[in-house]
Image (cartoon, rainbow, N blue to C red):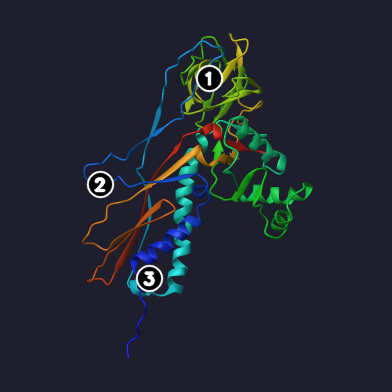
Amino acid sequence: MANVFKTKADGDVLRKLLASFINNTPFLKTINNQHDGRFGVEGAKNGGTLLVREPAEFTVRSGDVMDVQDISEATQSFTVATRRGIDIETSSYERLMSLDDEADRLIEPMMQKLGAEVEYTILSDVYKKIFNLVGTPATTPASQLAILNANARLSESLAPSGDRSLLVTSGAMAALANAVGLYLHKGDEISRAFTRGYIGEAANMKWYETDMIPNHTNGTRDDTTPVCNTSTGITSGSALIITTGADGTMAEGDIFTIADVYAINRQTKQRYSYLQQFVIRAAITNDGTDTWTVSPIPTTSGAKQNVELVSAGAGKAIVNVAAGGSGAASLVSAQNLAYHRDFCTFVTADQYVAPNLRMTQKRIDNISMRLWVGDDIKNDKFPVRLDVLFGWLVQRPEWAARVRG
């Protein structure tokens, strides 16, 4: 008598794949996840581009006389056009997808690989847009003070107090867990640090460990001569800063400060005690008279003011190494992150499903995935294709910070 196996439907398999994928993506679980169902819909195709509104900002009147201001809403666009997938082929598809032990043996490693690739792809781009940096370059966070400083920077940037996360490398988590005994914690956090080597929640953030955090390599620039005339080299509302005297290269993601250009409280417009940090948005080879593209866009007045120029004029030193810069020339360092959930938006889109083919699409927690099973009767082959179509946008970079020791 022939063996008979209970066969799982493709939808059941895909749900299991999606659940495993989500479990292997700690970063995606802690940022703003959205799903866009308009892709491929007849009469509503948008070319894969989404528009996201930026929060409106206002000034406050003092006194009785009205001072009407214009409402100026801005949008940011991004494209959901990045695809990652895993493909396999087997001559015994029924055994692969029908027996739980066989499916489990393949689902977990497949989703670990796919999840790791998606997260690394996003993180490798995201960190380059974050200009806040706390701690000393190229040092591993090894005390709760480093995390408290990151939390403070998020608060100073007016990030909401809830939904904050810390994403660090295994080495950083080991150092932090080792140091937890030096502080007062809830008993279960101390126990977890001692027995499992990680911390669940502290310093107003949930802590996550991942080895998908990218390294950043600084450009070959130094701090010897670069300066900026803040009277003429900074134009309020422009992302371009004119510099002189710089040599070497500035890498995308390098962070620097300019003397007498201070960060401010975006609500009260009061100056903080530290200089505003800027991040390079486009790599450049310096020739001594250069224009750098930076973020945040320096704005010196009005509702969107984000910096205060103190003693504006010529010869203001540009610092890459100390005072909030990303460190020495060619320095390589891991980009541990602290962030609020809404600093970044991740969107997946449904993909085309042909009615006459064995194609299945499911969505869990706003993450969509498609499973496509084919067949080759001549060669006894069953190709299986998994696809995720996604995009991302760093909407509020000020609500995130790179974390050093």
From what the image shows, is residue 388 above or below residue 305? below
Question: How crowded is the residue under tag 1: few (<14 C-alpha within 10 Å), some, or many (20+)?
Answer: many
* Amino acid at dot 1: Gln
Q: Which of pointers 1 and 3 indicates the residue nearer the eye?
A: 1
Q: Which residue is under mark 2?
A: 41
Q: Which residue is under mark 1?
A: 305
Q: Earlier in the sequence, mark 1 or mark 2?
A: 2
Question: How crowded is the residue under tag 2: few (<14 C-alpha within 10 Å), some, or many (20+)?
Answer: few
* Amino acid at dot 3: Met
Q: Quadrant of the N terminus?
A: bottom left
Q: Which residue is under mark 3?
A: 97
Q: Please say if the residues under marks 1 and 2 sit with CB atoms less than 8 Å apart.
A: no
Question: How crowded is the residue under tag 3: few (<14 C-alpha within 10 Å), some, or many (20+)?
Answer: many
At x 66%, y 26%, the residue is 322
Image coords of residue 268 (percent x, y): 60, 21
From what the image shows, is residue 380 above or below residue 52? below
Image coords of residue 255 (percent x, y): 57, 29
